């Protein structure tokens, strides 16, 4: 291969843009900063109306399936057919699976077909290991093979790194997700003198603790609004909880918001809260910190990598609405503490979580794997 030709990476991911989550944003942010590389990505179609093939930024996307959620279960099979055709045409330097889920199973099947092709596994899982194994069910043998067969892994937190080592993977390192500091940066605060604004940005599922945040509203005895951005399977259950607690005039469900509109919400917010029960890393905390917000989170999963209690944020206890309310009041009532947390949070994000620095680290892994005999 001529030196001036781009190096080629084939990516396997359960979902991809325009479906938006932390995983999809991470892949997009990394790949668009590497214009000298060719990235092809195979993913499940999942949603009707999405094109079977298209290019978004620096990624050529190939969707397999029929436009239903069930497509993710077909990804390891239909995806392999597509991957073999693309491999014959492009002779990839490297394959890259995003998470040890359906994209991981596809990566495993491809690795067995092409054992000499280097395979990188990225771990972004947000659920607890116990919940992941419960979902894997009878496929545990193949699940563990994802870890055993991968040549190298990148985990976005220390918690996921230790989990991977425990699952039998050979070698890897921690490289977190990042923040686009051009989009997420402090703006002039939109002051609301009548009430305090508490914000969470979250998929509405049990693990993110939104029910505990809603219940915390019972213990806040000052004018406030809790803004909830996001959608998910628990939405109706959470709205019912709001009615049961008599908080209809206090809690607002905004639904899905465009990614680049989030900074406007951060600018009008007094404190960011997500009382997670499990978390791979927690990108939304970093985005909030980059916008100059004090944050409250739980001491679970990857959150302690960046949240140090009373330094870069406050810890609240899991499943404890009273404690969440107490921490909200502490931040709002103590201006010195609030300003200290904001300052430290901003410095940390700029120093450790810029996408430019993270992309450079990822590219180093690519080159290391490609150059290994």
Image (cartoon, grey):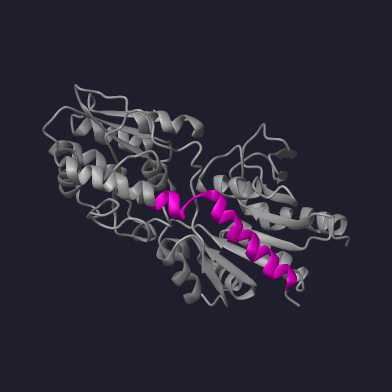
Q: Quadrant of residue 18?
A: top right
- The location of residue 65, given as percent across then percent down, is 69, 45
Q: Is residue 247 above or below residue 41?
A: above
Q: Nearer the viewer, residue 21 or 290?
A: 290
Is 150 within the magenta? no
Point out the image quarter for the N terminus: bottom right
- Residue at image point 49% right, 36% down: 183
- The location of residue 265, given as percent across then percent down, is 38, 30
Q: Nearer the viewer, residue 66 or 165?
A: 165
Q: Assign the magenta stretch its main secondary structure.
A: helix
Q: Quadrant of residue 191?
A: top left
Asked whether, in this view, residue 255 is left or right of residue 66, the answer is left
Is 349 within the magenta? yes
What span is colored magenta in the figure? 348-371
- The location of residue 283, given as percent across then percent down, is 44, 48
Query: How many numbered callouts?
Result: 0
Task: Using the rendered image of the protein, determine whether residue 342 is visible from the camera's viewpoint.
Answer: yes
Q: Quadrant of residue 94?
A: bottom right
Asked whether, in this view, residue 231 is left or right of residue 148, the answer is left
Point out the image quarter for the C terminus: bottom right
Asked whether, in this view, residue 247 is left or right of residue 12, the answer is left
Task: Using the rendered image of the protein, determine whether residue 205 is visible from the camera's viewpoint.
Answer: no
- The location of residue 111, given as percent across then percent down, is 72, 68
Q: Nearer the viewer, residue 293 or 145?
A: 293
Q: Residue furthest left?
A: 221
Asked whether, in this view, residue 356 is left or right of residue 223, the answer is right
Q: Is residue 110 above or below residue 32?
A: below
- Residue at image point 73% right, 56% down: 10
- Residue at image point 41% right, 65% down: 130
- Residue at image point 68% right, 55% down: 11
């Amino acid at each position: 291969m001529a030196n001036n030709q781009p190096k080629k990476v084939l990516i396997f991911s359960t979902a991809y843009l325009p479906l938006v989550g932390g995983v999809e944003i991470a892949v997009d942010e990394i790949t668009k900063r590497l214009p000298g590389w060719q990235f092809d990505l195979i993913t499940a179609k999942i949603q009707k109306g999405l094109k079977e093939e298209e290019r978004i930024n620096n990624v050529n996307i190939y969707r397999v399936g029929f436009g239903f959620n069930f497509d993710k279960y077909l990804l390891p099979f239909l995806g392999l057919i597509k991957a073999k055709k693309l491999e014959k045409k492009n002779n990839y330097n490297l394959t890259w699976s995003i998470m040890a889920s359906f994209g991981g199973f596809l990566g495993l099947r491809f690795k067995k077909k092409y054992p000499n092709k280097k395979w990188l596994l990225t771990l972004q899982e947000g659920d607890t290991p116990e919940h992941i194994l419960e979902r894997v069910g009878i496929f545990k043998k193949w699940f563990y093979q994802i870890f055993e067969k991968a040549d190298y892994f990148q985990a976005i937190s220390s918690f996921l790194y230790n989990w991977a080592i425990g699952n039998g993977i050979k070698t890897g390192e921690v490289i977190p997700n990042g923040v686009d500091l051009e989009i997420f940066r402090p703006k002039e605060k939109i002051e609301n003198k009548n009430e305090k604004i508490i914000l969470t940005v979250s998929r509405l599922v049990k693990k993110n603790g939104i029910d505990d945040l809603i219940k915390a509203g019972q213990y806040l005895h000052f004018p406030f609004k809790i803004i909830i951005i996001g959608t998910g399977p628990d939405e109706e259950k959470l709205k019912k909880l709001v009615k049961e607690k008599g908080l209809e005039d206090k809690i607002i469900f905004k639904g899905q918001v465009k990614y680049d509109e989030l900074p406007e919400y951060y600018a009008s917010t007094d404190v960011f809260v997500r009382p997670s029960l499990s978390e791979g890393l927690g990108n939304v905390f970093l985005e909030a910190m980059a916008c100059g917000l004090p944050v409250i989170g739980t001491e679970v999963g990857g959150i302690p990598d960046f949240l140090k209690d009373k330094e870069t944020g406050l810890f609240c206890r899991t499943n404890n609405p009273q404690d969440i309310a107490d921490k909200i009041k502490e931040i709002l009532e103590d201006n010195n503490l609030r300003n200290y947390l904001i300052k430290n949070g901003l410095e940390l994000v700029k120093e450790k979580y810029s996408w430019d620095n993270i992309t450079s680290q990822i590219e180093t892994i690519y080159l290391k794997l490609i150059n290994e005999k």
